[in-house]
Amino acid sequence: MGNRLSKIYTRTGDDGTTGLGDGSRVPKDSLRVEAYGTVDELNSTIGMVLASDNVDDAVRETLVQVQHELFDLGGELCIPGMAMIEDADITRLENSLDSFNEPLPPLKDFILPGGGMAASCCHLARTVCRRAERQVIALGRQEEIRPQAQRYLNRLSDLLFVLGRVLARAGGHGEVLWQHERRRKPKP
């Protein structure tokens, strides 16, 4: 196991830089730090889903596994050249996605974020996941990034969408469907 943190503050970042896992220092607002920082934020929002009521064992087990993989992905992004997310992780996400999606009715309308606390938190996690994916794409334009990182986030956002649907139904709230006709009409 790596080094244990016995002292949390080091003062080394007071100049606006942070250390990567390979020992190099970069600005705290670099694309690499933005990418792995957003993956960390995503992991935290998934923690909010797990802290909600009405999360069944299958969803919980899936999301806890995802949290571990997101920690690995953060490590991969923090250490240039590191490889931690594999094709098998993406395949597992696809299998979970298919399994959770299969019993759901086909979509005929857009779904709004809502449907209870767990579902709402899942939709929030989905949007953070999409932002993390965009940041990994931006980083990949400047530096070498393995394609598994981007593919993992792309598949995970789809899974989080489906889990939001599952949680809305399981919580008894139901899905919140977008109703185009509810738009306010301008007064003549």
Image (tube, rainbow, N blue to C red):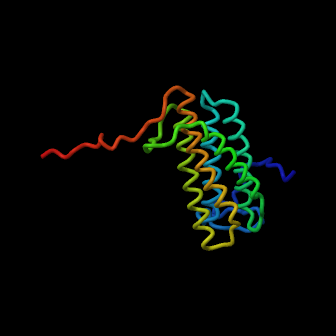
| Above or below, comparing residue 117 to residue 40 in the picture | above
| Above or below, comparing residue 31 to residue 126 in the picture | below
Farthest residue, direction right = 1
- The mark total stands at 0
| Above or below, comparing residue 104 to residue 37 in the picture | above
Q: Nearer the viewer, residue 39 or 20?
A: 39
Q: Nearer the viewer, residue 146 or 23?
A: 146
- Picture coordinates of residue 62 (x, y %)? 70, 40
The quadrant in which residue 61 appears is top right
Farthest residue, direction left = 188
Q: Nearer the viewer, residue 75 or 57?
A: 57
Q: Nearer the viewer, residue 106 or 17?
A: 106
User: Residue drawn at (55%, 27%), measured in percent from left and top?
Assistant: 171
Farthest residue, direction bottom = 142
- Picture coordinates of residue 179 (x, y %)? 35, 40
User: Residue drawn at (70%, 61%), measured in percent from left and top?
Assistant: 148
- Picture coordinates of residue 111 (x, y %)? 45, 42
- Picture coordinates of residue 166 (x, y %)? 57, 35
